[in-house]
Image: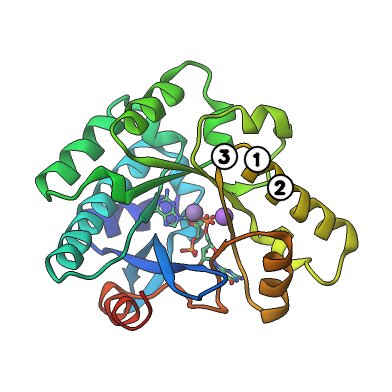
Amino acid sequence: IALVRQLDQALSENLVEPYYQPIVNLETNEIVGLEALARLRIGGEMVSVGEYHLALTDPRLACELTGKMLEQVAQDMRGWLDAGIDFQHVGVNVTTGDFQRGDLAERIIDIFGWADVPLSHIVLEVNEAVFVGGSDRSVPHAVEALRSRGILVALDDFGTGFASLTHLLSFPVDVIKIDRSFVTKLGVDGPSETVVSGLVDIVKKLGMRIVAEGVEYEAQADALRRFGCRLAQGYLYSKPVSAAQCTRLLEAYA
Ligand code: G
Ligand code: G
Ligand code: MN
Ligand code: NA
């Protein structure tokens, strides 16, 4: 309850700010995209919304957070486009509550339309609970509406839920993000290496892109390269940073 009140207050006082974490090409270390991660300015500190994940099961709070994030991400992207800075793609996280109102696709199209940012620069990051938990067709409908307008969709935290592989891979997505828990075990756990290497093969054969999350060590990046994984994200490259810091990273490495 305290968390709900804190999040509610941070949202109504506009204390939400997107941070950005680079996604890099493992061969060249060039930045090929970003993931927007919400931070709340609370007591002078930038706090991850991960601390508020229970509060975010409230659809009203989830929708409000997404609205604030989309508006600021659209502004930041507009700024980079105006400055000729190449960010390629920006991922935005959405949850089950975002789909319940039934207007997610319209909101995204509206906000990025106003900012005059092409939808092809946006990746909607959705975890398997969103796809598997929906009892009606509202999630697939919204996802299809957005994909038909050129938005990319990523299945986030891949491998952490309980859905079967075939079920998961039947969802129409463009990108699979392998969860950090698999990457952490590279080099220490043989079976995990087999799983990751097999996943990379399957996902590529299905014509989707694959991003490894939570890469912290060069040895993990080496293993991923050996398995044919091209894209990665993690502290080895950069932690999530403010838009201003991200601009400097993009100018240096994009
Ligand atoms: O920012 P951090 O890397 O600490 O993220 C913690 C968790 O919060 C992750 O699971 C991430 O997906 C989620 N998260 C980060 N930003 C957002 C956001 O804007 N909206 C939603 N719904 N979840 C977010
Ligand atoms: O759930 P999602 O994948 O959207 O959120 C990514 C989360 O992982 C964020 O909390 C982000 O800050 C965190 N993260 C990103 N890179 C690393 C990393 O290399 N190591 C660890 N431990 N966490 C990371
Ligand atoms: Mn994500
Ligand atoms: Na993840």
Question: Residue 214: x, y in percent?
Answer: 61, 67
Mark 1, residue position = 205
Q: Secondary structure at mark 1?
A: helix
State left or right for residue 176 relative to residue 78.
Answer: right
How many residues crowd around disc 2 within 10 Å: few (fewer than 14), some, or many (20 or more)?
Answer: some
Q: Quadrant of ligand 4?
A: bottom right
The residue under the point 49% across, 69% down is 24
State left or right for residue 152 relative to residue 214.
Answer: left
How many residues crowd around disc 3 within 10 Å: few (fewer than 14), some, or many (20 or more)?
Answer: few
Amino acid type at image mark 3: Gly
Residue 243 occupies quadrant? bottom left
Measure how far apart labels 1 and 2 are at the Cα level: 6 Å
Amino acid type at image mark 2: Asp
How many residues crowd around disc 1 within 10 Å: few (fewer than 14), some, or many (20 or more)?
Answer: few
> Farthest residue in the top direction?
136
The residue under the point 44% across, 46% down is 56
Question: Residue 59: x, y in percent?
Answer: 38, 36
Mark 2, residue position = 201
The residue closer to the viewer here, 20 or 1, is: 20
Mark 3, residue position = 207
Label pair 3/1, CB-CB below 8 angstroms: yes
Question: Residue 72: x, y in percent?
Answer: 22, 58
Label pair 2/3, CB-CB below 8 angstroms: no
Measure how far apart labels 3 and 1 are at the Cα level: 5 Å
Q: Secondary structure at mark 2?
A: helix
Residue 232, compared with residue 247, is above or below; it is above
Residue 207 occupies quadrant? top right
Residue 20, compared with residue 95, is above or below; it is below
Residue 181, compared with residue 112, is above or below; it is below
Label pair 1/2, CB-CB below 8 angstroms: yes
Amino acid type at image mark 1: Lys
The residue closer to the viewer here, 96 or 1, is: 96
